[in-house]
């Protein structure tokens, strides 16, 4: 059955939506693929659903080929399973919670590990039932504080999530690799560039976690990679730790003359003026910056901690949230300082810090601050600093915290060379969950010896609607979308222009021929729409091939567009099918 624009539920827009920040958001709304309902929530219109179905079809093909079986679980879920794994609390404000009329607690699923574990527990009891991998393509819900970039960061989104169940760790490793390989095939078929990076497991937990990131300027993830093959999300980067240095024979600390030097730059300038050293001037890297952070724990309590790091580094709050998770992390406020009078803002030194110190504040150090290194830092007195303060002799810490920023040129932890940084968007994530969820929910089976063994799990997610937006970001020009053929809603867009019935008759015959060759065709048959509007809509909608029957229709000639390359040429009708095949 021919899809005709005269009957298609579609309204294109001339202007970009006022709330759109990125190209995909602008074009998907203007071209009538999606329609905003509220911040981060979109209605899917016929064209958008067709693209979604193409993407889902590729994902489904490869999941089934990898041995996974499809199910569909509800999005509205009871509280109790998430309470058992502590994620009812750990997810914090990011989870949508609600109650039914009887006051029972429910949630809109941000992810489904618990429910899949319970499903397998309900139906399987023997090692003979394993391994098994189940998947679904289902909507997820997260209460984003600032939904942005259209489909790239929404409150409701569609994911493919899969879960493997194995008897032992060796089985989990095999299942994990099978899914990882399937992901590579999926992204190759979708034409998406990707980088596989080490990642932090976050609230998911587990022993191993890798992200598939698509390099893109609007990406919200920063990742690092080396020429030697290392790649990691910055949150998962582990700083190479220098060797400790000898302490014996190091001079005692020296107070620097008082001065108004509350910043690292002012301190370095002052130190070089009043206490120059032989060999090289003081730099920010010689100073120890003591940054005060406030942690909000799951039970709502607020804790102030201090992290010492080289003065040429800044705190990366995303890395800090990993280091101190699941607590929320933010810079300390003036109120925090008022409550902790022992902290002299701008002149904090490690001498008064630590859980056993007078302040009672836990103190952490950057991995680069190893025993035997000497630093210029605060003396805990306004206007006073000290030089030559030695780690391991003059101060100690309660632990190490990976919170400093990661920069281009930093060494890869595997020794594969200096790092470069890039921006990317997560399109897939694979986890070796291990037994965290199975133990919490009692998922056990009888092993070969008749004893109960806890099942080990893997979790594997792909962002379906995010991938659609990323493809729109990658395939467009100043006129509109330009879909690749494997995800385009239609293969060919036939346009009849003008008032002459000859053009419309020719277009009708071309549509029949193309459909006879098993092409999906959309036909712009609108009788009272100007040629200019029709052609602009064809550019905006972005089908791979556009065929225009217009002024040369009486001569049996049509205009053929290759939407991706921008090439346009006249083609005799007799040669059209061959020309379409070539595109």
Image (cartoon, helix red, strand yellow):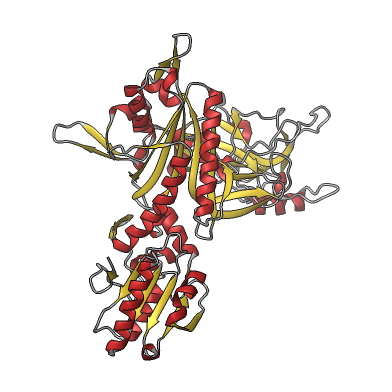
In this picture, is 248 found above or below 34? above
Q: Quadrant of residue 81?
A: top left
Give the residue at x 34% y 59%: 50
In this picture, is 342 found above or below 129? below
**Count of residue discs:** 0
Viewer can see residue 317: no
Q: Nearer the viewer, residue 457 or 277?
A: 457
Is 305 displayed left or right of 463 in the figure?
Answer: right
Q: Quadrant of residue 455?
A: top left
Q: Nearer the viewer, residue 349 or 245?
A: 245
The spot of residue 531 in percent (x, y) is 33, 85
The spot of residue 7 in percent (x, y) is 23, 71
Viewer can see residue 270: yes
Is 561 displayed left or right of 174 in the figure?
Answer: left
Q: Nearer the viewer, residue 146 or 232?
A: 232
Q: Nearer the viewer, residue 368 or 509?
A: 509
The spot of residue 122 in percent (x, y) is 32, 23
Q: Identify the image quadrant of the N terminus.
A: bottom left
Give the residue at x 51% y 32%: 175
In this picture, is 186 found above or below 479? above
The spot of residue 176 in percent (x, y) is 53, 34
In this picture, is 471 found above or below 445? below
Give the residue at x 33% y 55%: 40
């Amino acid at each position: 059955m021919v899809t005709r624009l005269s009957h298609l539920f579609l309204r294109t827009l001339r202007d970009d939506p006022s709330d759109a920040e990125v190209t995909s958001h602008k074009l998907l709304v203007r071209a009538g693929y999606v329609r905003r309902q509220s911040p981060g929530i979109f209605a899917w219109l016929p064209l958008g659903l067709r693209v979604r179905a193409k993407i889902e079809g590729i994902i489904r093909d490869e999941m089934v080929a990898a041995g996974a079986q499809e199910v569909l679980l509800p999005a509205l879920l009871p509280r109790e399973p998430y309470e058992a794994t502590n994620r009812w609390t750990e997810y914090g404000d990011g989870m949508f919670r609600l109650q039914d009329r009887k006051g029972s607690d429910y949630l809109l699923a941000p992810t489904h590990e618990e429910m899949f574990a319970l499903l397998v527990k309900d139906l399987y009891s023997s090692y003979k039932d394993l391994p098994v991998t189940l998947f679904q393509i289902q909507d997820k819900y997260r209460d984003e504080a600032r939904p942005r970039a259209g489909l790239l960061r929404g409150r409701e989104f569609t994911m493919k999530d899969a879960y493997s169940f194995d008897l032992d760790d060796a089985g989990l490793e095999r299942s994990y690799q099978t899914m990882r390989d399937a992901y590579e095939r999926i992204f190759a078929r979708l034409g998406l560039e990707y980088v596989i990076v080490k990642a932090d497991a976050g609230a998911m937990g587990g022993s191993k976690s890798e992200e598939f990131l698509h390099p893109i300027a609007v990406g919200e993830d920063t990742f690092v990679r080396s020429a030697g093959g290392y790649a990691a999300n910055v949150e998962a980067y582990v700083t190479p730790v220098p060797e400790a240095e000898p302490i014996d024979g190091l001079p005692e600390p020296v107070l620097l003359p008082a001065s108004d030097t509350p910043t690292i730059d002012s301190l370095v300038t002052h130190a070089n003026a009043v206490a120059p050293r032989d060999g090289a001037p003081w730099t920010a890297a010689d100073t120890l910056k003591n940054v005060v952070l406030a942690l909000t724990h799951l039970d709502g309590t607020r804790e102030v901690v201090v992290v010492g790091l080289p003065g040429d580094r800044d705190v990366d709050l995303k890395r800090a949230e990993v280091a101190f998770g699941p607590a929320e992390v933010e810079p300390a406020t003036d109120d925090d300082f008022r409550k902790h009078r022992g902290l002299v803002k701008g002149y904090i030194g490690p001498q008064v810090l630590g859980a056993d110190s007078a302040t009672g504040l836990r103190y952490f150090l950057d991995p680069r601050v190893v025993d035997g290194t000497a630093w210029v830092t605060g003396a805990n007195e306004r206007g006073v600093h000290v030089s030559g303060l030695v780690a391991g002799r003059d101060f100690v810490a309660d632990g190490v915290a990976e919170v400093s920023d990661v920069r281009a040129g930093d060494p890869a932890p595997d020794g594969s060379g200096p790092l470069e940084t890039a921006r990317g968007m997560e399109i897939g994530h694979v986890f070796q969950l291990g037994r965290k969820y199975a133990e919490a929910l009692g998922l056990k089976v009888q092993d070969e010896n008749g004893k109960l063994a806890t099942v080990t799990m893997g979790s594997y997610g792909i962002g379906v609607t995010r991938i659609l937006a990323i493809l729109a970001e990658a395939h467009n020009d100043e006129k509109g979308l330009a879909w690749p053929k494997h995800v385009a809603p239609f293969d060919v867009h036939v346009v009849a222009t003008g008032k002459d019935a000859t053009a419309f008759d020719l277009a009708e015959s071309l549509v029949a021929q193309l459909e006879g060759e098993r092409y999906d065709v959309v036909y712009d048959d609108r009788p009272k729409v100007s040629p200019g509007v029709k052609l602009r809509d064809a550019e905006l909608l972005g089908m791979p091939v556009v065929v225009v029957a217009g002024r040369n229709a009486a001569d049996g000639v049509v205009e053929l567009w290759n939407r991706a390359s921008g090439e346009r040429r006249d083609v005799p009708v007799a040669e059209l099918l061959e020309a379409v095949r070539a595109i």
